[in-house]
Image (cartoon, grey):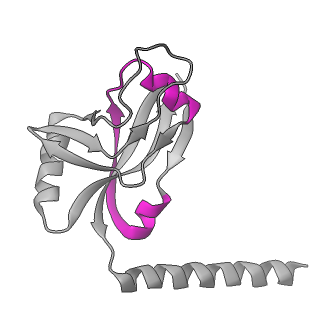
């Protein structure tokens, strides 16, 4: 059985504002019309984060717009959604997030075999000088590629 993977959205700000220590794939509990809205790509998560409450992982700040072709039985766009992980993964995440500075941030949203999956990152916030160093490295790489292309011509 081949694994189809269709990328829906990527959190570009997360990789700029946080350094990702590790990432975990997890499923999401969705209701009714949320599935169709996600497949249509109407998803927004600028300030989304995950938290652990009573040994369950919940994602907050994830906005899934209402499905335009549905009837009155539509979903609440801003409700917290439960993430599906194994118990031992949740215990490990609890230990890691209790350390100073670690947080759970969604990195990617994608469909895998027709099911929504989230690539959840265990992240640590970057300081301003770390962000400047990343910008400098990106500029240096871009200049090197530009010179390499010019030398090939």
Q: Residue placed at 34% from the left, 32% from the top?
A: 27
Image coordinates for residue 8, horizontal then vertical, percent: 54, 40
Q: Residue furthest right?
A: 153
Q: Residue placed at 86% from the left, 79% from the top?
A: 152
Q: Residue furthest left?
A: 54
Please tell me which residue lies in front, 22 or 30: 30
10 relative to 40, above or below: below
Residue 77: say if magenta: no
99 relative to 39, above or below: below
Image coordinates for residue 108, horizontal then vertical, percent: 45, 47
Q: Is residue 143 visible?
A: yes
| Image quarter of residue 74 | top left
Tally of marks:
0
Q: Quadrant of the C terminus?
A: bottom right
Please tell me which residue lies in front, 137 or 72: 72
Q: Which residues are magenta?
A: 12-41
| Image quarter of residue 76 | top left
Image coordinates for residue 94, horizontal then vertical, percent: 13, 50
Task: Decide if residue 10 is on the left or right side of residue 99.
Answer: right
Q: Is residue 3 visible?
A: no
Q: Residue placed at 69% from the left, 84% from the top?
A: 143
| Image quarter of residue 125 | bottom left
Residue 14: say if magenta: yes
Q: Residue placed at 47% from the left, 34% from the top?
A: 65
């Amino acid at each position: 059985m081949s694994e189809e993977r269709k990328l829906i959205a990527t959190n570009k700000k997360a990789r700029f504002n946080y350094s990702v220590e590790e990432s975990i794939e997890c499923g999401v509990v969705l209701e009714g019309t949320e599935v169709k809205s996600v497949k249509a790509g109407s998803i927004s998560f600028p300030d989304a984060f995950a938290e652990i409450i009573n040994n369950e992982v919940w994602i907050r700040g994830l906005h899934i717009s209402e499905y335009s072709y549905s009837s009155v039985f539509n979903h609440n766009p801003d409700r917290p959604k439960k993430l599906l992980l194994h118990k031992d993964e949740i215990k490990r995440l609890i230990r890691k997030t209790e350390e100073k500075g670690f947080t759970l941030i969604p990195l990617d949203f994608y469909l895998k075999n027709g099911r929504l999956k989230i690539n959840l990152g265990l992240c640590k916030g970057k300081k301003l000088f770390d962000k400047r160093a990343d910008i400098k490295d990106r500029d240096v790489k871009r200049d090197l590629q530009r010179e390499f292309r010019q030398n090939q011509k």
